[in-house]
Amino acid sequence: MKSIGVFTSGGDAPGMNAAIRAVVRTSISCRVKPFGVLHGYQGLIDGEIQEMNSHSVSNIIQRGGTILKSVRSMEFMTPEGRKKAFDNVSKFGLDGLVAIGGDGTFTGAKIFTEEYGIPFIGIPGTIDNDLYGTDYTIGYDTALNTVVQMVDKIRDTASSHNRLFFIEVMGKDAGFLALRSGISVGAEAILIPETSTYIDKLVDKLRNERKRHKTSLIIIVAEGDQSGGAFEVAARVKEQFNQYDTRVTVLGHVQRGGSPSAMDRVLASRLGSAAVKALLDGKKDVMVGVVNKEIAFTPFSRATKHHNKLNMDLLQLAELLAS
Ligand code: F6P
């Protein structure tokens, strides 16, 4: 293997730059030429491919976002788009590819490898932590800390005004970010897609809290919760229970930005380096992750089809501690 390409795809996540840096520098140390592909799969199609060197990744380990940019490419979903991508892979002489992204990224990688036989290694980069085959995805820890900082601030104002807040956090159709942030901020309730949401039960809980003279209430709502999101739950609760002045905050894309945490920088460095070594070892069609502290490889088909398992004990713990 003489040359490899690296790109980021899907929603960006803090720590992606640290992973790019690790891929580039490990390649150089193994005498492999690293190429950066801009704008994800779309850049493969459009030939936005350039050779990188050690200097190209200087001073980026601490930066959020991705220096290689990210796009969700519709054209790559078509056979014609993938053919153009393959023509560019051949033109630039890339012998293997490293994709940093989530579910959609690895689905694309799997199809491309099946069609053209190019070895692909995936690195899990998403704030959602929803991939099977790794305990944590790059960006999750940073996003979690961002949510906690934001909600702590909301708690201050909620206490000052005796208010009830519904706070919506990201996570697509998974509740990882919601669950751990909810525990960390001492939320009075956490609504996640993995469990059913009963408005009557929630209202009973809020009534009890009122009786106990709670001065502020924080309800964390995962964006993928079956209730339809924070605004919807707030409106439905209000129909039955109106004893608190209520506000809704949707945290939104603030959760995707910022300097990566030390945990994410270390994880990204390990996974970036392991991805290059895996390609050199002849591995393909796998996502590299960390399971029980060790590097582990999972076929794309398993990484994307099975969700990372949510720890239900944590939900029970959250309920116990909020009671
Ligand atoms: O997958 C990461 C994520 O931030 C999800 O949590 C969220 O549902 C989605 O991306 C938002 O995507 P976009 O940036 O396209 O609005």
Image: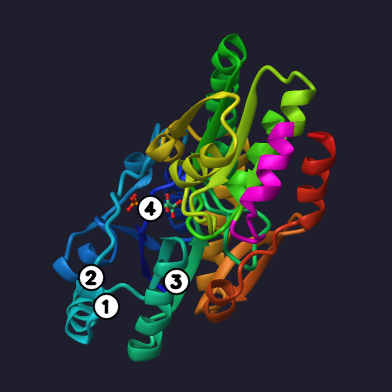
- Say whether residue 198 is magenta: yes
- Give the residue type that dot 4 points to: Gly
Q: Are marks 2 and 1 in contact (CB under 8 Å)?
A: yes
Magenta span: predominant SS is helix
Secondary structure at numbered mark 2 = loop
Q: Are marks 4 and 2 in contact (CB under 8 Å)?
A: no
Is disc 1 surrounded by few (<14), some (14 to 19) or many (20+) residues within 10 Å?
A: some
In which quadrant will I find the N terminus?
bottom left
Measure the alpha-carbon separation of dots 3 and 4. 13 Å
- Residue under label 1, please give it: 77
- Give the residue type that dot 1 points to: Met
Task: Tell me if the residue at label 4 has its CB under 8 Å from ligand 1.
Answer: yes
Q: Residue furthest front?
A: 240
User: Residue at horizontal 44%, vertical 47%?
Assistant: 16
Q: Position of residue 316 (x, y in %)?
A: 81, 49
Q: Is residue 29 visible?
A: no
Measure the alpha-carbon separation of dots 1 and 4. 17 Å
- Residue under label 3, please give it: 106
5 and 151: which is toward the camera: 151
Measure the alpha-carbon separation of dots 2 and 3. 15 Å
**Region of the chain picked out in magenta, as a range:** 193-207
- Residue under label 2, please give it: 74
Q: Is residue 17 visible?
A: yes
